[in-house]
């Protein structure tokens, strides 16, 4: 019953959520029957909690969320307390962490990297507390989720990759076969194929979001195999360092880390949760918070980073033209799209919805290494 | 780069950390002390390496600092197990817990931070022109030469061709006889346990200064334990320890190359290879070394504290 490809970005999706996902798939963003909104809280009394998957010093995912925490602190300096816990594992320890937040009197709790059921247990038992789960897929009366429409900037970077790769062989260092990785690899190759229809994408799954050793080895293996443009979804810079050493291009995730490979760095899918966190905390204080589902659009929470120093000007220009087109409302994710086996999955002329993109769980033709 | 060269290059690099730690453990076990603290020593070494290189911008100083920290922790361990004669297994486990915990706590500010300077490859003239091996081995960083050539050859010579080496092995086989022959058992044990621990610290630094190269909590990821298992497979010989490290590196490299080349094997299976390898490394000696049992056997006094006044 559990389909491995329905796993969420940082956690394993539970079976109940699979049902919820199916409901979302049909395109309904409808909210569940919703109890009376949680009452307003005075800033001096409010406690906000954040649970992170990694250390705030990772210069990646958790660092970006921590910037959001700092923004909240700046906007609401009188908050009674901000609770922040790093390295929350995907285990019963997560449940304990969030239960601790609740018992300390938190009013609004963010799980910055979906811990699934381990969070939901606490959510169910704490109806007076508001919860937001990043990359979540479950709706409850006091639980909402938020994530990034990262496939658009990824497509833009893919366009650059298609123009810059000489071999047409692109490499991807993947964590797990989860929707973020499927949409990331697919969007990346689609961007590349829009300029080089012969381009292919090889992925290596390393079973971690943060394993510099494995990522470095995976990057090396990809380059040895002829890939001259690396992309991936890692919380550290290991494969960028490999690319720099071997003289190939690389694009990253989360933040601007070009200093680890100034010659290889092309761009990043950069993320920014500052406005979102400030907005959510404001709503909770005002008593207008509702469990919302947000996919932050390109330019509003997720974007491509400023192009790397060595990226040719005409490449940057062409890719930015595509970016402008997308910002103008055009979607590249329009049929006909075939999966790796050649079956038509999206008929010609049909555009995939945001929710379909969020739940993407199959590889397009040309992407290898993800689905068996 | 062709398949074999690429595979071997990665194998030498990836196996280096295990080879170095295993060579260190060989030293300790040859004099009769089981050091299960390798994992903790490597964690401390990895952190020391990155901290020292951040401060000095010199990978050599980083590596030396890691050796020193390994030696300091090793000396404490040796004091407990050789002088006080405390239980070696418990002390080793304590060392692992302490090392990983300390590294995690102290290392918070270094987490995810790449090394500012690393060991760069040095191609050896002439030798680096040999097909396959030239690129895969003789164009690597200096630690690789240390791990696969200098240490195994030097230590093998020391252990098997010098009187001091005989003394050292005698201490591990029969400390009472060695003592009667005028060898200072405690001195030799203390020396080699400390030296072995220093190498384990160095193995951690190899990871953060030459291989990954950055520090993150859990960067050792159980490789200390694998190194302990390799020592048994290697028959307590430095040369074999280096080779088994290389073999292990080859297994991990295969997993990634297989995925990169799209071999029709499930990625999950390929990532399983190192652990299957460890199992194999434990089972093989039991079966295959049967005939060579005497040559590959563990030192007779392994794990036993030596009391002069008993018996």
Image: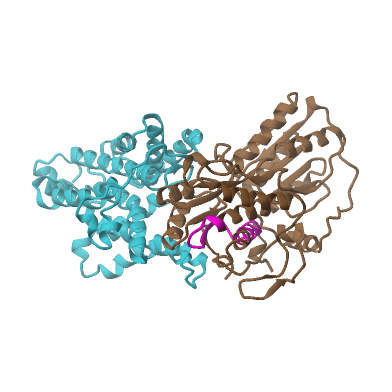
Please identify the residue farthest to the right as the structure is shown.
A36
Q: Position of residue A179 (x, y in %)?
A: 66, 59
- Confirm whether residue B126 shows in the render: yes
**Chain drawn cyan in the picture:** B
Q: Please give left or right for residue B118 compared with residue A269 in the image.
A: left
Q: Residue at x 54, y 50 (%)?
A: A251
Instruction: In this rendered view, identify the residue nearer to me: B29 or A161.
Output: A161
Examine the structure image and report whether residue A167 is included in the region drawn in magenta. yes
Q: Quadrant of the N terminus of chain B?
A: bottom left
Instruction: In this rendered view, identify the residue nearer to me: A200 or A301.
Output: A200
Instruction: In this rendered view, identify the residue nearer to me: A27 or A316.
Output: A316
Q: Residue at x 77, y 68 (%)?
A: A349
Q: Position of residue A362 (x, y in %)?
A: 65, 67
**Chain drawn brown in the picture:** A
Q: Is residue B118 above or below residue B257?
A: above
Identify the image quadrant of residue A7. Answer: bottom right
Examine the structure image and report whether residue B160 is included in the region drawn in magenta. no
Which residues are the magenta region? Answer: A163-189
- Confirm whether residue A107 shows in the render: no
Please identify the residue farthest to the front as the structure is shown.
A314
Q: Please give left or right for residue B199 compared with residue A126 in the image.
A: left
Q: Is residue A67 above or below residue A242?
A: above
Identify the image quadrant of residue B285. Answer: bottom left
Q: Position of residue B302 (x, y in %)?
A: 25, 51
Q: Residue at x 40, y 48 (%)?
A: A245
Q: Please give left or right for residue A28 compared with residue B19 in the image.
A: right
Q: Is residue A353 above or below residue B97?
A: below
Instruction: In this rendered view, identify the residue nearer to me: A38 or A94.
Output: A38
């Amino acid at each position: 019953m559990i389909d491995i490809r329905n796993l969420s970005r940082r956690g394993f999706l539970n079976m109940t959520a699979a049902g919820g996902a199916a409901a979302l798939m049909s395109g309904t963003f409808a909210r569940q029957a919703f109890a009376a909104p949680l009452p307003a809280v005075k800033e001096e009394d409010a406690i906000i909690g954040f649970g992170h998957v990694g250390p705030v010093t990772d210069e990646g995912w958790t660092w970006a969320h921590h910037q959001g925490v700092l923004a909240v602190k700046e906007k609401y300096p009188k908050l009674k307390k901000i609770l922040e816990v790093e390295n929350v594992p995907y285990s019963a320890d997560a449940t304990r962490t969030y239960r601790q937040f609740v018992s300390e009197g938190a009013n609004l709790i963010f799980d910055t990297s979906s811990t699934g059921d381990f969070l939901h247990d606490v959510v169910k038992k704490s109806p007076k507390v508001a919860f937001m789960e990043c990359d979540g897929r479950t709706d409850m009366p006091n639980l909402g989720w938020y994530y990034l429409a990262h496939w658009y900037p990824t497509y833009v970077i893919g366009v650059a990759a298609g123009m810059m790769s000489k071999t047409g062989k692109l490499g991807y260092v993947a964590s797990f076969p989860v929707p973020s990785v499927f949409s990331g690899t697919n969007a990346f190759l689609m961007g590349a194929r829009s300029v080089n229809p012969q381009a292919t994408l090889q992925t290596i799954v390393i079973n971690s979001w943060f394993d510099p050793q494995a990522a470095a080895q995976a990057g090396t293996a990809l380059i040895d195999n002829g890939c001259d443009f690396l992309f991936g979804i890692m919380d550290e810079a290991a494969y960028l360092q490999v690319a720099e050493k071997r003289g190939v291009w690389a694009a990253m995730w989360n933040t601007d880390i070009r200093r680890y490979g100034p010659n290889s760095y092309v761009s990043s899918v950069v993320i920014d949760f500052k406005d979102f966190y400030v907005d959510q905390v404001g709503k909770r204080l005002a008593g207008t918070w509702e469990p919302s589902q947000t996919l932050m659009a390109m330019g509003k929470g997720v974007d491509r980073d400023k192009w790397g120093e060595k990226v040719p000007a005409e490449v940057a220009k062409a890719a930015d033209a595509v970016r402008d087109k997308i910002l103008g409302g055009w979607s590249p994710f329009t049929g006909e799209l075939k999966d790796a086996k050649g079956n038509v999955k999206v008929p010609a002329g049909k555009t995939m919805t945001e929710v379909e993109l969020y739940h993407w769980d199959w590889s397009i033709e040309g992407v290898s290494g993800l689905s068996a | 780069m062709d398949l074999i060269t690429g595979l071997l290059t990665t194998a030498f690099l990836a196996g280096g950390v295990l080879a170095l730690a295993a060579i260190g453990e060989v030293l300790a076990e040859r004099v009769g002390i089981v050091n299960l603290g390798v994992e903790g020593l490597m964690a401390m070494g990895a952190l020391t390496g990155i901290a020292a290189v951040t401060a000095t911008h010199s990978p050599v100083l980083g590596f030396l600092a890691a050796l020193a920290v390994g030696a300091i922790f090793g000396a404490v361990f040796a004091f407990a197990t050789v002088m006080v004669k405390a239980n070696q297994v418990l002390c080793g486990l304590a060392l692992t817990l302490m090392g990983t915990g300390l590294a995690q706590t102290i290392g918070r500010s270094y987490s995810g931070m790449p090394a500012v300077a690393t060991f760069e490859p040095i191609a050896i003239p002439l030798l680096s022109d040999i097909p396959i091996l030239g690129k895969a081995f003789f164009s690597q960083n200096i630690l690789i030469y240390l791990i696969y050539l200098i240490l195994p050859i030097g230590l093998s010579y020391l252990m098997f061709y010098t009187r001091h080496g005989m003394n050292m092995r005698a201490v591990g086989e029969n400390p009472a006889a060695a003592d009667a022959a005028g060898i200072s058992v405690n001195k030799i044990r203390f020396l080699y346990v400390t030296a072995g621990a220093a190498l384990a610290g160095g193995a951690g630094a190899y990871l953060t200064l030459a291989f990954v190269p950055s520090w993150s909590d859990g960067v050792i990821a159980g490789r200390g334990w694998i190194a302990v298992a390799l020592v048994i497979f290697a028959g307590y010989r430095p040369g074999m320890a280096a080779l088994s490290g290389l073999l292990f590196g080859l297994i991990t490299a295969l997993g990634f190359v297989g995925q990169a080349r799209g071999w029709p094997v499930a990625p999950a299976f390929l990532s399983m290879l190192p652990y299957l390898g460890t199992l194999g490394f434990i089972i093989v000696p039991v079966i295959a070394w049967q005939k060579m049992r005497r040559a590959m056997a563990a030192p007779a006094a392994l794990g036993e504290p030596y009391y002069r006044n008993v018996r």
